[in-house]
Image: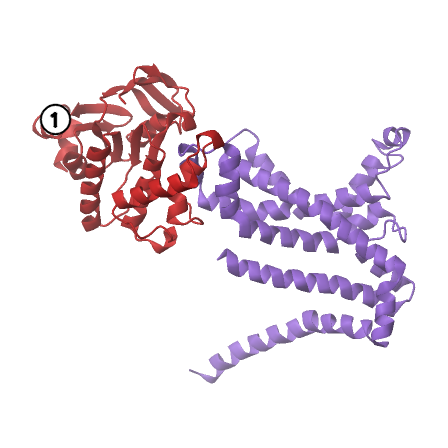
Amino acid sequence: MTRQSRLLPRLLIAIAVLSTLVMVVAPLFYIFAAAFAQGWRAYVQNIMDPLTLHAIWLTVLVALIVVPLNIVFGVAAAWLIARFRFPGRSLLVTAIEIPFSISPIIAGICYLLLYGRQGFLGPWLEAHDIQILFALPGIVLVTLFVTSPFVAREVLPLMQAQGSEQEEAAVTLGASGWQIFRRVTLPNIRWALLYGAVLCTARAVGEFGGVSVVSGSIRGQTNTLPLHVELLFNDLNVAGAFAAASTLTLIAVVTLLLKAVLEGRAR
Amino acid sequence: MDIHIDEIAKEFGKATALKPVTLSIPSGALVALLGPSGSGKTTLLRILGGLEFPTSGRVLFDGQDATGMSVQDRRAGFVFQSYALFRHMTVFDNIAYGLNARPRAKRPEKAEIARRVTKLLELIQLPDIGARYPSQLSGGQRQRVALARALAIEPRMLLLDEPFGALDAKVRKELRQGLRDIHDETGLTTVFVTHDQDEAMELADVVVVMSMGSIEQIGRPQDIRDRPATPFVRDFIAA
């Protein structure tokens, strides 16, 4: 082996390691370093701030609503696409991908134009005293839109690869539709489903752009955790911002670990 | 149970899978649908099982029209080419599946289900594999488990799609005899699909030769060998 051919791989590995350190590991450490800069006590105090606690609760609440809905939607859509041939099928496949290709801000603005006071449905909603924008429903709707592809995109390829033979076998053995779903379809896709749910959770918790447009960022009311971090930072409350950010980071790290475990199980 | 297929045709969109075919299968017969791929033999089998519905024509079971009957009501024991065992269930649970899926009023007691599964495992001569998972079995064992699972529902007929297609020659020969024995013991009307003429000739009472969605000849193996009805049958048998 020539000198040059040994040098090149080492150089590439060095670049990869260095860029990971600079772009991923350093910021991660810095978040926790800054969060704990004034000691444990200050950190706990920052987290226990009622507005921060509310932001954490709101973010968890949104995830608790959005993720189960997306699981139901994702499995239903994947099952429909994988098992049936019908007009508009390829349109549905494309429609599921739309949230991936549209900037979340655009989604937020669409909701603003649709449900806002001057919007299409605004006057009707106002007349019936229904508040969607700058309230929980708006945040949930935008988060739903942004995260809707995650479960379907994980489950669909697996269902297509597995084919429908096991389900056909179950039906010849006399099983009803629900029995087949619960005892054959669901167990076969469970790891992909959990994996999709984990990705969906991570995205729902971290969503900033779309939510920032429709939530109004009212502290203690419609301020989710990512929005709260920004507000604290703009207030020059750096320690508070990093403390709040550290909880988000923690959720992300736990999610990544879960994802790694699930990927192992899926194989 | 005797089966009568009356002018059954099947189209998938613009493609014709079956031209109108008519075929009578007497009760207790062991019938082979023999032909190359694309001959419509699997489509015909799936129509009998209720997994496809014909574009036109009728299917009669014991003289009763069963054309629109649901898969569940047909009680056809179906063995799939790739066996389609439930991979997350043990062999025991696979075989018990059809019994456990019955509505509560018709479901046998737990002990009765266990007794029947044990009996079926003995019938397929694999009494000790109940606790294993399909991934831990050989191809031949999987095929026999799929057969036991189909028999567990006390089917009115047995339908097998290329039952030995995925197995090596030696195992295939053994299992042929196994299927013949099980057929003779249960007396079930049995239809299997194959592209292997030796298999059809050796195993079946009646061979139905198919090509391009039509039936070319129906007859006992000896008759088909001695008196091929069409040039296609002559060439196919000679191959």
Q: In this view, does B115 lie to the left or right of A49?
A: left
Q: In this view, does A230 lie to the left or right of B221?
A: right
> In this structure image, what is the colour of chain B?
red
Percent coordinates x, y for residue A262 in the rendering: 56, 58
Q: Is residue A266 left or right of residue B235?
A: right
Q: Nearer the viewer, residue A32 or A122?
A: A32
**What crowding class fits label 1: few (fewer than 14 Cα within 10 Å), some (14-19), or many (20 or more)?**
many
Q: Which chain is purple?
A: A
Q: In which quarter of the image is residue A263?
A: bottom right
What residue is rendered at 33% in x and 42% in y? B146
**Which residue is identified by label 1?**
B228
- Which quarter of the figure is the N terminus of chain A placed in? bottom left
What residue is rendered at 76% in x and 42% in y? A141
Which residue occupies the extreme left position in the image? Answer: B226
Asked if A156 appears above or below A257 in the picture, the reply is above
Q: In which quarter of the image is residue B78?
A: top left
Q: Find numbered disc 1 in the image and state the secondary structure of the residue it sits on.
A: loop
